[in-house]
Image (spheres, rainbow, N blue to C red):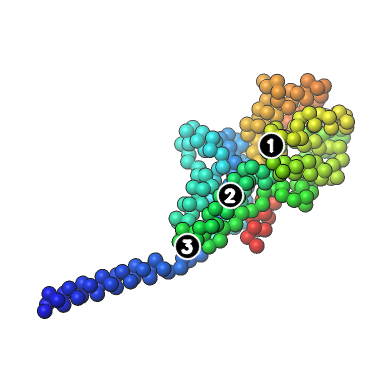
């Protein structure tokens, strides 16, 4: 009889424990919100200031929301891990980690200029995660817009650039040459041409936009410069960070194909550079935060 009672008691305890575990598993997760900033990245410590400025601005604007960072470039991530012993996750790794840590609402904010190939990759990832339901999915997963996604965005960017180069523009006869990255064979690349239209309206004949990997090319820029005949040029990257493209493709002194040397060979002599990433600009940081707020609406 005692053995039977003991067995019955053990079974009862087992049922209670199992029931508690199932109830715990079925209990809805409490909301936990986060922001994941996806940057192409940079392995140059001095250029990282641009990324840090945008990230720090997001943290200051959303003090109650955890902000994390991922790099989309595998080459840069591996180089940083090898040379600096710092591990930076991919967006996929970062989202999986946030899910595992119980984040329920995540806003993914790209640190890109245009919605080109890199942005498409992030969109595909976010859409994939958004299809996952239940405990392995998020309650809400959103993707923000890059800096240039509409005609209005180009107009806003033009005003930021006019303020950014106010001292240079105050010098009559000085033209600003901007090097964007470009994304070949992608419709989003047309936004560079739209930005040129916005700049022509904001500061006629003062800005010339080109890209290092697509169109407009340096040849298009030179054609515009010959038409306007400026007395001096200021070369600057139209990129979040002033990294390899800015220091080599744009201003590389030892590279015959760098823009500065091509322009000198064309006949332009009075050329200076402003090798500062757009991410360091306070107006760009303000716009970055505004884009996150728009995503959260």
Report the disc number at residue 184: 1
Q: How far separated are the C-alphas under marks 1 and 3?
A: 39 Å
Q: How far separated are the C-alphas under marks 1 and 2?
A: 19 Å
Looking at the image, is mark 1 or mark 3 earlier in the sequence? 3
Residue 58 visible from this viewpoint? no
Please tell me which residue is depicted at 50% across the width and 61% down the height of the picture: 133
Residue contact between numbered discs 1 and 3, judged by CB atoms under 8 Å: no
- Say if 62 sits above or below 1 in the image: above
Q: How far separated are the C-alphas under marks 3 and 2?
A: 20 Å
Residue nearest the observer in this picture, 53 or 15: 15
Please tell me which residue is depicted at 66% across the width and 43% down the height of the picture: 116
Residue 188, position as x, y percentages in the image: 71, 44
Q: How many residues crowd around disc 2 within 10 Å: few (fewer than 14), some, or many (20 or more)?
A: few
Looking at the image, is mark 1 or mark 2 earlier in the sequence? 2
Q: Which residue is mark 2?
A: 124
Residue 157, position as x, y percentages in the image: 75, 47
Residue contact between numbered discs 1 and 2, judged by CB atoms under 8 Å: no
Would you say 50 lies left or right of 264 here? left
Report the disc number at residue 134: 3
Residue 291, position as x, y percentages in the image: 67, 54
Callout 3: helix, strand or loop?
Answer: helix
Looking at the image, is mark 3 or mark 2 earlier in the sequence? 2
Q: How many residues crowd around disc 1 within 10 Å: few (fewer than 14), some, or many (20 or more)?
A: some
Residue 151, position as x, y percentages in the image: 78, 50
Residue nearest the observer in this picture, 289 or 201: 201
Indicate the quadrant where residue 224 lies: top right
Residue nearest the observer in this picture, 67 or 265: 265
Location of the N terminus (image quadrant): bottom left
Q: How many residues crowd around disc 3 within 10 Å: few (fewer than 14), some, or many (20 or more)?
A: few
């Amino acid at each position: 009889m005692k053995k039977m009672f003991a067995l019955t008691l053990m079974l009862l305890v087992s049922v209670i424990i199992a029931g508690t575990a199932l109830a715990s598993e079925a209990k809805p997760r409490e909301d936990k919100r986060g922001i994941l900033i996806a940057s192409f990245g940079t392995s140059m410590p001095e250029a990282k200031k641009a990324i840090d400025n945008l990230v720090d601005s997001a943290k200051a604007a959303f003090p109650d929301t955890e902000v994390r960072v991922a790099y989309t470039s595998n080459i840069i991530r591996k180089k940083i891990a090898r040379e600096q012993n710092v591990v930076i996750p991919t967006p996929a790794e970062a989202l999986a980690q946030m899910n595992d840590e119980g984040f329920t609402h995540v806003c993914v904010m790209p640190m890109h200029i245009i919605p080109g190939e890199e942005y498409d990759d992030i969109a595909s990832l976010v859409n994939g995660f958004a299809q996952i339901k239940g405990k392995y999915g998020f309650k809400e997963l959103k993707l923000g817009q890059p800096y240039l996604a509409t005609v209005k965005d180009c107009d806003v960017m033009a005003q930021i650039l006019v303020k950014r180069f106010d001292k240079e523009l105050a010098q009559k006869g000085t033209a600003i040459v901007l090097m964007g990255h470009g994304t070949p064979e992608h419709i989003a690349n047309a936004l560079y041409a739209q930005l040129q239209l916005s700049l022509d309206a904001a500061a006629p004949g003062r800005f010339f936009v080109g890209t290092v990997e697509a169109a407009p090319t340096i040849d298009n820029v030179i054609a515009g410069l010959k038409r306007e005949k400026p007395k001096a040029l200021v070369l600057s990257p139209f990129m979040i960070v002033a990294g390899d493209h800015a220091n080599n493709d744009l201003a590389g002194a030892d590279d015959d194909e760098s823009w500065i040397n091509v322009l000198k060979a064309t006949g332009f002599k009075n050329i200076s550079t402003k090798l500062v990433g757009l991410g360091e600009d306070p107006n760009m940081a303000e716009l970055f935060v505004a884009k996150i707020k728009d995503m959260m609406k």
